[in-house]
Amino acid sequence: MHSQFQRLAPFIREYIYEKKWTALRDIQEAAIAAILDGSGHLLIASGTASGKTEAAFFPVISALCAKRPASVGALYIGPLKALINDQAQRLAPLMERAELPLWRWHGDVSDHHKKSLLEKPSGILQITPESLEALLLRSPGMIRSLFHALSFVIIDEVHAFMGSERGSQILCQLARIEAAALCRPRRIGLSATLGSYGGAAEWLARGSGFREGAIIRDDKNRRRISIALDYFSGEERSCCEALYRQVRGRRCIIFTNSRNEAENTAAALSEIAGGRRGERFLVHHGSVSASLRGETERELRDSDSPVTVAATATLEMGIDIGKLDRVIQIGPPLSVSAFVPRLGRSGRLRGRSEIYFSSLEEKGKWEHPVNGLPWDLLKTIAVIELYLGEKWIEQSEENPLPYSLLVHQTLSVLCSLGPHSPALLSRRVLALPAFSRFGPEDFAELAAHLISLDLIEQTDEGELIAGLEAGRLAAHYSFYSVFADYSEYRVVAGGREIGRVNFIPPEGSTIVLGGRYWRVEWIGQREREISVGPGEAGGRRVWRGSGAELHGRIAAGMRKALCEQTVYPYLSARARRRLAEARQAAKQWKLAEAIVIPPEGCEASPAGEPRPFVLLPWLGSRAMRTLLFILQNREHRQSLGIRSFSRENDLSVNIRSSLPLSGFREALALLLERYKTPESLETLIDPARIPLLGKFDPYLPPRALARQYAAAMLEPVELKSEEQ
């Protein structure tokens, strides 16, 4: 053992000997020194199953035992209840030896357990962001006694929080705790998937008064990686049979990009297996009950028998699932940051990570052959190459103007702390780290709108208090979370349910459901119901896209895979043939240079008649969204001669224009120059035509809604082509 081992508490050293560990890992050695000798924040970044949990908790528990705190000494924030339960099982033996309480606090924990903590705050508290919000809201008078001696805050799976409103909520919560309890704990972040270590360290320190602290990272990839990418063309049965050959007799997780796909995959494999003894196919996703998910997790962790679990992102996190033989991904990973933790799930004991990709291309009739390219195959190649070849991972970007979260935290502060003068409420809320880009005038405008909605009331003395509507919202457990979950919204016409949607369309907009157009007449937040009446095709239609954000680097990687001649050794024979066909088409249509692709078989049309072509700019989702707003603008449609346009995928647009191709390019280039600033991007937006993405977006005034959407969802367009 190295010298740092001797600095751990005696019972931890005994625990390590009992586990028969021959040495601490490098990150654990470094973390012990940083935590016991340092005074700032710490980011620990290392791969899955590399000992990050022990790296943080061994020295933290040792420090708490050396100086026992008079309140909760360490706060652990985890993204999932299952992860908290898993970590509690791992830490319980150590905490018993330390004679320190280990408290869990989430929706499945008994009120008696929580009451015991409130009566005698001590030890380590493990909690989700939602339960922490509930604690701040329901027990504001207990915050000082709970946390006045808080020394450490451990945030697990930092990458899952960065760039999200949930992560910004955590930073606000920590600032509120520090202000109420007069404490300044050190923060320790844990992550296996980061695009920017410096960015993560800066995020971890935000709002704490400390500069970003030390970074401990382990970039050594001790595992060999085995990748296979197979391809199927409209052959769903053949695809499932190939999947079955991959999982038979093995312990596997099949990751899918949707809950429905997970269910269908498990059912198809079970059917192919035909009830063969010893073959089990389970599912794990957010719609499965907590008890069934727990049984699946225990099956993976505690059993060595063959089992296959079809899952969504719920099994990406650091829950202990034991040894896996192979990971399978159906369809392309949504991002590089989603691919990396899935890859790391296998090979824990054998030292080799195995992942098999299955790419199924649906056959269809396309307006232009370019639309029939194998997009999923190209995206999968791009994701693999960006990580393995360049070690690149998306860097999380937070919404600069999170108005939805601003509503939430404003109501939470009012409901928990009572009346405020307008000036005091503005100062208190805008001092929270997520709102540094808002000014007092922005807050005053929002507060006035919330007053008009009866969410805030102003007393005769001029003070602001929570209104009846805010009290009703805050009284329900759903208020604690800031991420939107619209999966339960019923769509009702004439008192009859006609379907369900997983987003909130603006009132007055048009949606399509059951093959008919419907006009949105009323949205019931409390009832989770949308009332509609007959609509028309020409109504204000909401376009939502595929739902998955595509980074510009991935779009560029897809273009590279298509237009260059790189050989990828992990492709199956079917995948190689399909890529070769696609590359031949790319050569024919000059996709390495062209953005405006002419109609098939001709370059010219009679003067003045609409000319069909494809616009393929290879942009990420934010820039592509900006381009679509420009194309939708009535004035711009006229200057571009657009008679119609449609989409068949997330990367290209089918357009019919009366302009010649050269004229269209020139007109488009001039338009793009007009939208290079945040203010200019806001002018593109009609709040009635955009989906309400944030949970509290329905309570925003139109200007705030447009500003938030432009800041988070749009960016200036740069067309990188010889045709600019």
Image (cartoon, rainbow, N blue to C red):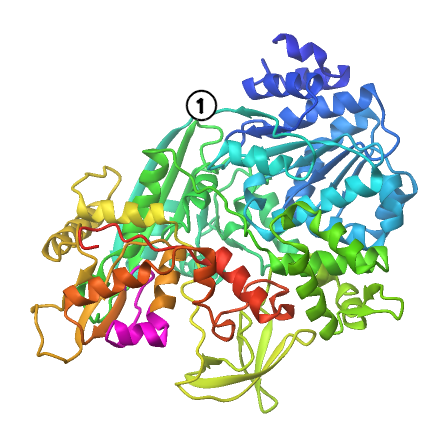
Is 579 situated left or right of 75 in this image?
left
Of 458 and 556, which appears nearest the observer?
458
Of 180 and 272, which appears nearest the observer?
180
In the rendered image, the quadrant that contains the C terminus is bottom left
Expressed as whole percent of the image width and height from the top left, the position of residue 12 reads 72, 19
Residue 514 visible in the current orientation = yes
Is 374 situated left or right of 486 in this image?
left
Please tell me whether mark 1 sits on a helix, a strand or a loop. Answer: loop
Residue at x-position 57% and y-position 33%: 201
634 to 668, vertically: above or below: below
Expressed as whole percent of the image width and height from the top left, the position of residue 688 reads 51, 75
- Residue corresponding to mark 1: 220
Expressed as whole percent of the image width and height from the top left, the position of residue 534 reads 49, 90
Expressed as whole percent of the image width and height from the top left, the position of residue 361 reads 28, 60
**What is the tally of numbered marks visible in this picture?**
1
In the rendered image, the quadrant that contains the N terminus is top right
217 to 411, vertically: above or below: above
Of 118 and 482, which appears nearest the observer?
482
Q: Magenta includes 647?
A: yes
Q: Quadrant of residue 696?
A: bottom right
Crowd class of label 1 (few under 14; some 14 to 19; many from 20; radius 10 Å): few
Q: Magenta includes 393?
A: no
Start-end of magenta stretch:
631-652
Residue at x-position 19% and y-position 52%: 578
Q: Amino acid at mark 1?
A: Lys
Residue 106 visible in the current orientation = no
Of 121 and 1, which appears nearest the observer?
121
